């Protein structure tokens, strides 16, 4: 059901400063940048391996657009750091249903729009050992939404 770690999401106060840190310290470069109003973030994807074909892994840097957004609240409570882990799947709606069948709570009924045209669903951190867990179906891959 899950084929890769799609990305690790990291909450930061200053996206440009965090991009510079990951570029200058680790040598990663930005594959993609966008604003996701629904999720309340400005974000950058830095590719860690592979190519942008839906099978790569990324570091995702997340700066909140609003204090009352998920990342804004996380930063106020915890400061900068790892916000979530995202697993790649070729069918996020089916993966969400499978997780619900196993008793986990999805944080939306249907997939939402994620980075780079992906479809995403989150699982409640309290059902995942304290880790906010995201499921990602990359853009252009097969979909069977319910
Ligand atoms: C909150 N909690 C977390 C957490 N955020 N635990 C682990 N990791 C996190 N990131 C814990 C809090 O410490 C608290 O625990 C409890 O969950 C309730 O937190 P809250 O903030 O008071 O409550 P809510 O319900 O307002 O929000 C938590 C929840 C929310 C996870 C449901 O943040 C959410 O819906 N997240 C999913 C969407 C999201 O994160 N979007 C931003 C990334 P205690 O023990 O104190 O009760 S968007 C993204 O990543 C997109 C662009 C993409 O990948 O393409």
Image (cartoon, rainbow, N blue to C red):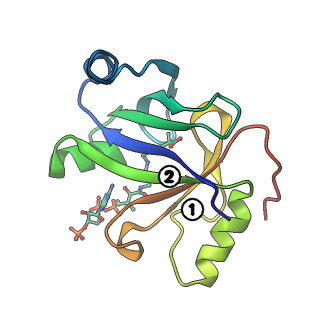
Give the number of the mark in front: 2 or 1. 2
Q: Position of residue 94 (x, y in %)?
A: 73, 67
Labelled disc at residue 140: none
Residue labelled with disc 1: 108
Ligand 1 closer than 8 Å to the CB at disc 1? no
Tell me whether the residue at label 2 lies in contact with that at label 1, contact meaning CB atoms closer than 8 angstroms: no
Quadrant (top left, top right, bottom left, bottom right) of the C terminus: bottom right
Q: Is residue 30 left or right of residue 141?
A: left
Q: Quadrant of ligand 1?
A: bottom left
The one of 79 and 48 positioned closer to us in this rendering: 48
Q: Is mark 2 within 8 Å of ligand 1?
A: yes
Separation of marks 2 and 1 at Cα, in angstroms: 15 Å
Query: Which residue is depicted at the point 26% across and 33% down?
Result: 12
* 2 or 1: tag closer to the N-terminus: 2
Secondary structure at numbered mark 2: strand
Query: How far across and down, in percent of the image, does residue 79 sit?
Result: 16, 43
Q: Say whether residue 37 is left or right of residue 140.
A: left
Residue 85 lies, in percent from the top left, at 43, 53
Image spot of residue 45 (x, y percent)? 48, 29
Q: Quadrant for the N terminus, please.
A: bottom right
């Amino acid at each position: 059901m899950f084929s890769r770690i799609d990305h690790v999401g990291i909450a930061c106060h200053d996206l440009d400063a965090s991009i510079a840190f990951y570029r200058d310290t680790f040598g990663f470069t930005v594959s993609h940048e966008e604003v996701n109003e629904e999720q309340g973030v400005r974000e950058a994807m830095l590719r860690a391996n592979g190519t942008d074909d839906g099978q790569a892994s990324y570091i995702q840097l997340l700066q909140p657009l609003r204090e009352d957004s998920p990342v804004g609240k996380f930063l106020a409570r915890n400061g900068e750091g790892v916000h979530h882990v995202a697993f790649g799947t070729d069918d996020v709606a089916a993966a969400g249903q499978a997780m619900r069948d196993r008793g986990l709570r999805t944080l939306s009924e249907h997939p939402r729009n994620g980075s780079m045209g992906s479809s995403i669903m989150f699982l409640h951190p309290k059902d995942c050992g304290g880790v906010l867990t995201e499921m990602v179906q990359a853009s252009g891959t097969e979909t069977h939404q319910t």
